[in-house]
Structures are given as C-alpha cells and as structure tokens.
C-alpha cells in the first residue's frame, strides 16, 4: 500500500505541472491588472533600479543559479553577483524602512 501511495503522489505531482494549452490561454485572458498588493511591492522593487529588478527576476523567477546570473550580467564571478544581489535587496529594505512600512501594509 505504501509503495502504491507514493507512486500515485509522484504521478499527481508530475501531471499537475502540465496543463492544456487552451486552458492556459483562458487563464491568461482572465488576468487583468496586478493585485494592489503586487503593484505596491513592484513599486518598491522599482526604487532599486531596472538592473536590480532584472537581476532579482533572473534569480528568483527564472531560477538561474548565481554563476549564470554572473555571466548574464557581466560580473567577474559568482561572489560578485551574490554581493550585488544582496545590495539590491538592501536598497528595497531601506526604502521600506524609510517609509516605516510593516508586513500588514502589504496585506490590504
């Protein structure tokens, strides 16, 4: 029973990642404007600059490792890219601190 259970779970997880292309198109049509919370967060990310946004997007959304990020953005190595990513995040944190925002401000 245990083996069958794990095989079904594995199959469900593998199949749940794939959706029909027509269904995906319908989902995209229903997306209008980003949620106000998302818009607010994007505004803070924009304060860090376009290059920082591109780097954070590459790392967090495109799932590139730091070596690939370093190559894509022209840094001398993985460590340099890591330091720059940290600086980008610190810019956003500083902006949030200056505005004295709390976690609840993003939950409206």
Image (tube, rainbow, N blue to C red):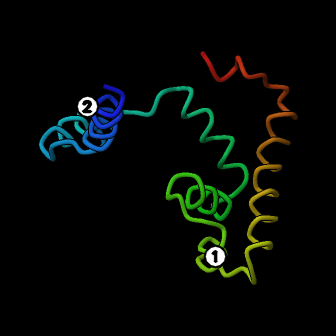
**Label 1 crowd (10 A; few <14 / some 14-19 / many >=20):** few
Q: Nearer the viewer, mark 2 or mark 1?
A: 1
Look at 73% across and 53% down and name the residue there.
48
- Which quadrant, please, contains the N terminus? top left
* Residue 88 screen position, x and y as percent: 76, 56
Where 18 sits versus 68, above or below? above
In the rendered image, which residue does mark 1 sit on? 73
Q: Earlier in the sequence, mark 2 or mark 1?
A: 2
Tell me the distance, in whole angstroms, between the alpha carbons under discs 2 and 1.
Answer: 34 Å
- Horizontally, is 85 left or right of 56 in the view? right
Residue in the image at 67% along x and 75% along y: 70
Q: Position of residue 33 (x, y in %)?
A: 40, 33
Between 51 and 60, the residue placed more toward the observer is: 60
Where is the C terminus found, in terms of image quarters?
top right
Residue named by callout 2: 30
Front position in the image: 14 or 42: 14
Q: Is residue 62 left or right of residue 104?
A: left
Task: Tell me whether the residue at label 2 lies in contact with that at label 1, contact meaning CB atoms closer than 8 angstroms.
Answer: no
Query: Which SS class for mark 1?
Result: helix
């Amino acid at each position: 029973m245990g083996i069958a259970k794990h095989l079904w779970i594995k199959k469900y997880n593998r199949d749940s990642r794939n959706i029909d292309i027509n269904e995906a198109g319908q989902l995209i049509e229903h997306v209008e404007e980003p949620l106000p919370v998302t818009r607010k967060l994007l505004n803070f990310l924009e304060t860090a600059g376009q290059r920082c946004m591109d780097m954070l997007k590459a790392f967090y959304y495109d799932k590139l490792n730091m070596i690939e990020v370093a190559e894509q953005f022209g840094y001398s190595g993985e460590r340099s890219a890591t330091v720059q990513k940290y600086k980008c995040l610190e810019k956003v944190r500083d902006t949030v601190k200056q505005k004295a925002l709390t976690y609840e401000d993003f939950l409206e």
